[in-house]
Image (cartoon, rainbow, N blue to C red):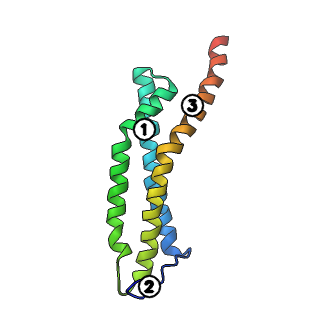
């Protein structure tokens, strides 16, 4: 229990669901930043799939981490709130803060892998069609 007498258990309720929707939007933005930049590098500089996604992840690391840091620091007052409605603020804060940290790790490590697999499969499926023409 906190000093304020708050129970730290978080249940799935309307506040956590709002936090999840917010979280989905923010994490999706991170993934879009990396994928769109990788596609741009492939189009403009002619990089292969792996080089493009590695460079995109490296160049977009700072904006992704800055967004995550700003969001988590902005959520701290919700986590430390007391008084009326503190439990609901704590619930939404826990979901967003923990989800942003975990989601950012997934964005930086899982999205490039999935992008490489899907882009390779798409490129592989296109090659026979262009050779036939």
Choose between 116 and 7: the one closer to the eye.
7
Of labels 2 and 3, earlier in sequence is: 2
Quadrant placement of the C terminus: top right
Q: Which residue is labeled 1 in the image? A: 57
Q: How many marks?
A: 3
- Counting from the top left corner in percent of width and height, residue 26 is at 43, 54
First along the sequence among labels 3 and 1: 1
Q: Earlier in the sequence, mark 2 or mark 1?
A: 2
**Nearer-the-camera pick, 85 or 64:** 64
For the point 41% across and 76% down, the residue is 89
Disc 3 target residue: 119
Q: Position of residue 13 (x, y in %)?
A: 54, 75
Q: Which residue is mark 2?
A: 6
Question: Does 129 sit above or below residue 113?
Answer: above
CA separation, marks 2 and 1?
40 Å
**Residue at x-position 45% and y-position 84%:** 1
- How far is disc 3 from disc 1 in space, using C-alphas? 15 Å
* C-alpha distance separating marks 2 and 3: 48 Å
Residue 113 vs 2, above or below: the answer is above
Instruction: Evaluate if marks 2 and 3 touch, with contact meaning CB atoms under 8 Å apart.
Output: no
Q: Is residue 72 visible?
A: yes
- Neighbour tally class for label 3: few under 14, some 14-19, many 20 plus, Cα within 10 Å: some
- Label 3 vs label 1, nearer the camera: 1
Q: Position of residue 88 (x, y in %)?
A: 44, 79
């Amino acid at each position: 229990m906190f000093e304020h007498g708050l129970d730290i258990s978080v249940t799935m309720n309307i506040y956590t669901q709002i936090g999840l929707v917010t979280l989905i939007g923010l994490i999706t933005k991170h993934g879009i930043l990396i994928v769109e930049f990788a596609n741009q590098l492939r189009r403009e500089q002619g990089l292969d799939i792996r080089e493009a996604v590695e460079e995109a992840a490296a160049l977009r690391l700072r904006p992704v981490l800055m967004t995550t840091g700003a969001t988590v620091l902005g959520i701290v007052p919700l986590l430390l709130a007391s008084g009326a409605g503190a439990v609901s603020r704590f619930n939404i804060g826990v979901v967003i803060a923990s989800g942003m940290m975990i989601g950012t790790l997934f964005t930086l490590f899982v999205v490039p892998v999935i992008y490489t697999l899907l882009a390779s499969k798409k490129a592989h499926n296109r090659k026979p069609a262009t050779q036939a023409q």
